[in-house]
Image (cartoon, rainbow, N blue to C red):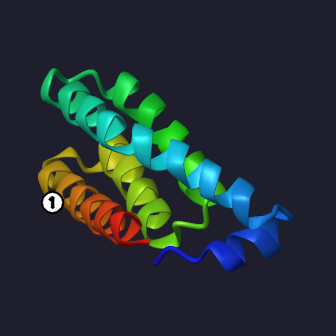
Amino acid sequence: MINTNRMCSEIGINKESADEILGMFFFELETKITKIQSSIDTKDFSGARDIIHQLTGSSSYCRMIELEAALKQLTYTIKFDQKQLPEHLDEVKTLSKQLQDEYARL
């Protein structure tokens, strides 16, 4: 799921820059997931969408394609099908955890 070579070639950066960007991404990932959960719990759907939007952009930039897709689905769910929120938020959390574990092994 984490492919620094692809990230480097697609956005035109070197390996050191990719490592730095990924470090920042993963440093913020857990906090943002927690904030999304909190916003949804308090029915602050606008706040949740704002955080999801930020994280979707970061995921795209870092070429975290699966997480980006799950975040887009979560945005759709907030807008149109809120009864599915627990399922889609769990998917985002699972993907996030898998990526964090993979990053820790790099």
- Which one is in front, 48 or 6? 6
* Quarter occupied by the C terminus: bottom left
Amino acid of disc 1: Glu
Residue 95 % position (x, y): 30, 66
- What residue is shown with label 1? 87
Toward which corner of the image does residue 44 lie, by quadrant? Answer: top left
Against 86, residue 6 (above or below) is below
Against 82, residue 70 (above or below) is below
Residue 59 % position (x, y): 54, 55
Residue 75 % position (x, y): 40, 47
Against 46, residue 62 (above or below) is below
Position of 103 with respect to 2 (left or right) is: left
Residue 86 % position (x, y): 13, 51
Residue appearing at x 38%, y 63% in the figure = 70
Position of 80 with respect to 90 (left or right) is: right
- Which one is in front, 27 or 53? 27
Position of 78 with respect to 10 (left or right) is: left
- Which one is in front, 106 or 77? 106
Residue appearing at x 53%, y 42% in the figure = 24
Secondary-structure class at tag 1: helix
Residue appearing at x 21%, y 32% in the figure = 40
